[in-house]
Image: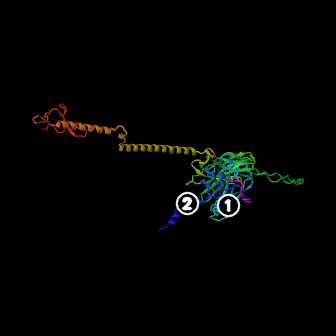
Amino acid sequence: MRLDRRTLVFLLIAPFLRSSGHSWLACVDYDEATLTCNGYARNWYNVMAGQSFSTDRGRDNRPGTDFPAGLVCDQSKEARTTPVTNAYDATYPMATLTAGQTVRWRWPAKNHATVGTQRGVQVFISPTADATTDAFIPTPIAEMDFSACNPRQANVDNADCQDTFVLPANTPPGVHTMMWWWEFNAGEFYNSCADVNVVASTGPAPAPAPAPGPAPGSPTPQPVAATANFVGMICPPVAVVGTQGSSFQVDVTFTATANSVIGVDIYREGSTTSVGRGTITTDTTGARTVMRRVTVTLNEPQPIPAEISSTHILRAWLVPASSYDASVSWIMTTTEALVPVEISNAIKLHHTCAQGSGSESSSSSEDSEELAKAKDANAALGTLFTILVIGVALYVLYRCNCFAKCGLPATSSNIRTERVNSRSKASEMKMTENAVVSVDRDHSVTPPNRERSGWTKHEDDNGKEYWFNEQTGESQWENPITTI
């Protein structure tokens, strides 16, 4: 079967067509009534100024891994500035949001307004206000429909997608970092970062005049405390040791409106039976968000799976101290955070997390040792390669007779050859002289010296035999005994 040129070209580029499933956060506070954006994604003014919100200018950041490890702002496109307001200007400002506000976000469909039931847009927020580094609570605070677009149909690049979520009412005032997160195909992740200034809600309108008090004998109504609790984990381990009695640490961030118990449990995936727990107690934190470290100890062994996979779940939770029951395996609460974890032979943190944050990773020393071994191996290979190059260079110089041309001393083999040649030439000259016959005045031939005494046999440097007379100093090739 023969393929024409157009079919062949299509087959060559077909594997790359899937990569067009990209998008990004364009507006952080969109006013649908006036069609204006009151706050933009980080560094929008520097990349997208004067461009349509759907123009491809490299805003499709791809972390390459799922959260929580992928909750990282792209440092080449959305790096944090000091102060954060430097990433915005008057035309493309930083958003100001009110705690409890219904917020509308906007993004381009990029031909994917009909992605069906795939994971929607998820919203993440930093655990504390006015931080100096980017960090996010590893559980989303909201999820939106990616395909809430106009028009909601495929192959419309600039379809306008918008959806809303409620900013938690207990969000502490101050500057927070938020993240727009979307998974298109399985394992194909996109994110965008934006800074927002959160202000406290002014509260409800003043209450009307109180009604008359209860009739005599009626029970006095008790005030109900407002609940605004929050809990999350910062850089939890991605792998823990499954040995019974082994322990690891998790940094937990929380807001507690009353004396509370904060705990971290580890469960097998799909189970509500805890196989390890750690707890701490805390007084009320008011509106502040604080961080504490919880040590979790396994109470039964957990086998390492044959294939690397996240077979367990870490669950952080918060309950009032008065309602905590240590005998309950699954603590009932609406204030929780969940992340996957695997069972391994060493505690491991994600590479984006700073060493010492969360679990005390025993794998760090192993990684350092492996790195040192790799460096030593590379150094040895480098030395070997250098010696090889020098040897090749010397051989080429020798073959090209560069030593003699550059005035360098000859090698020992050359010196020996010259000595052999000179001695052979001297022997030949001497024998030639002895072979010359004398001619007298009458032109009579004088025979060579017939003296037989004093002759001894020798070999020149080439192994050729010759005869030498120690008395007369003569030398000749022929045996003097047979010479006439």
Coloration mode: rainbow
Closer-to-camera residue (85/17): 85
Image check: 32 left or right of 428? Answer: right
Q: Which region is colored magenta?
A: 32-40
For residue 9, say whether it is visible: yes
Give the side of residue 321 with respect to residue 388, left or right: right
**x%, y% of residue 107?**
66, 58
Q: Which residue is mark 2?
A: 16
Q: Is residue 134 magenta?
A: no
Q: Residue furthest top?
A: 471
Instruction: Say which amino acid is labelled 1.
Output: Cys
Name which quarter of the figure residue 57 lies in.
bottom right
Q: Is residue 275 rendered to the left or right of residue 390?
A: right
Q: Residues within 10 Å of mark 2 (few under 14, many from 20)?
A: few
Q: Secondary structure at mark 1?
A: strand
> In which image quadrant can residue 155 be found?
bottom right
Tell me the number on the disc at residue 161: 1
In the rendered image, residue 25, in percent from the top left (x then y), is placed at: 66, 56
In the displayed image of the protein, which residue is found farthest to the front? 441
Can residue 323 be seen in the rendering of this structure?
no
Identified by mark 2, the residue type is Phe
Judge whether 156 appears above or below 263 on screen: below
